[in-house]
Amino acid sequence: METISIIDSKNHVNEKVKIGVWLTNKRSSGKIAFLQLRDGSAYFQGVVVKNNVSEEVFKIAKEVKQETSMYVTGTIHEDSRSHFGYEIEVEDIEIVGESEDYPITPKEHGTDFLMDHRHLWLRSSRQFAIMKIRNEMIRATYEFFNKEGFMKVDAPILTGSAPEGTTELFHTKYFDRDAYLSQSGQLYEEAGAMAYGKVFSFGPTFRAEKSKTRRHLIEFWMIEPEMAFTHQEESLELQERYIAYLVQNVLDHCDYELNILGRDKDVLKRYTELPYPRISYDEAIKMLQDSGEFPDVEWGADFGSPEETYLAEQFSKPVFVMNYPKAIKPFYMKPHPTRDDVVICADLLAPEGYGEIIGGSERATDTDYLKEQIEKAGLNMKDYEWYLDLRRYGSVPHSGFGLGLERAVTWITGEDHIREAIPFPRLLNRIYP
């Protein structure tokens, strides 16, 4: 008799197998007990028929508590009524670890309660589906950039300066020097691009800002590609191919998980159709003003959640908003060739109210211009001499972008809140031991 995982049930129909599982829920109707089981690979039902098992086994099936771990032995059958498609007719149960008074019951719980128990919340079916989809997006990310000829270059987590020129950094001491938790690997990826052509980083980033919006995390993971000999339009084409690739791979490999979440797959399929629409910041401002819903919006303003949501709702696919005002963007963005008030950049706004999922730009290459911008931003020139070296020694046109993984997962899974989609990143002022 073979020991298998639930996910492999399709290969063992009408065979007797053994599976290590946890109980997520149960119900009974006199002579039959229905056990909802999970093993980390999938969820399915175990059926225990009183007349087909010993009295002891049926007693266990009736009394076993939520999240008890056990081995079940039985025969796999097809089950067309379930999302998974298979179930096990249980013949024997061996208890491994007892569970008493499990705090997350099948009833409805508030987000705050679930966040306080997120080490256990991971076991729920929705969290299972979301984390499986997240894992597929990570796998597809590596596959995509490898196919596109990128090299992964890891940026440091402790840095001596702020890539975005902001004060919202977690401060620490690096022996006798000031250091900060990284908010972006971009500047280091630019160094990598000057060495290897096309590079990307994939690592944790931090923002020391107490935000109570659904779109902000203190800790999250960023994918940041950087490309030498690449102008903005070429970068935009890569960005939309990357997003379409992520969505398509979730559709191809996470059908079961999307069913658990009730995600509309026809909507997701629409996001694989390229190209994505492009509008300028100027056009975006006009759309907002003409709508009558944003009477106070003026040229030069940065967009918040309501503005981004409205703009994205005007399109059936993600939309690029291009060439924002220089005053609201970081110092390293390339100035527009015919306008002094905007830079060559773009944000990709996701439909369905999820806001910006990618921010990117062509990078400034003129040393004098960058010095001027560094000074205007009030940054220490010494901290950026190495960055200026990238322009002094064989500079080339180059572009890059960053995608926040957690927000992209929230969008693709269709969850209402980052907290509900990703239980582990630190949020607001919560510190998880």
Image (cartoon, rainbow, N blue to C red):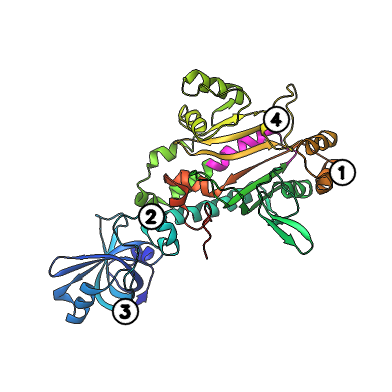
Give the crowd class for mark 4: few <14, some 14-19, many >=20 residues within 10 Å: some
Q: Earlier in the sequence, mark 2 or mark 4?
A: 2
Magenta stretch: helix, strand or loop mostly: helix
Residue 371, given in percent of the width and then of the height, sits at: 83, 37
The residue beneath circle 4 is: 326
The residue beneath circle 1 is: 393
The kind of residue tagged 3 is: Ile
**Number of the front mark, 1 or 4:** 4
Seen at 57% across and 23% down, the residue is 285
The residue beneath circle 2 is: 126
Q: SS for tag 2?
A: helix
Q: Quadrant of residue 61?
A: bottom left
Seen at 68% across and 36% down, the residue is 361
Whether residue 49 is visible here, answered yes or no, is yes
* Highlighted range, magenta: 228-243
The kind of residue tagged 2 is: Arg
Q: Spatial distance from mark 1 to mark 4, Cα to Cα?
A: 26 Å
The kind of residue tagged 1 is: Tyr
Give the crowd class for mark 1: few <14, some 14-19, many >=20 residues within 10 Å: few
The kind of residue tagged 4 is: Lys
Between 154 and 374, the one lying in front of the other is 374
Left/right of residue 113 with respect to residue 240 in the rendered view:
left
Seen at 54% across and 34% down, the residue is 304
Question: In this rendering, is residue 381 above or below 120?
Answer: above
The residue beneath circle 3 is: 95
Assess whether residue 110 is covered by the magenta stretch.
no
Residue 381, given in percent of the width and then of the height, sits at: 83, 44
**Tag 2 and tag 4, C-beta contact below 8 Å:** no
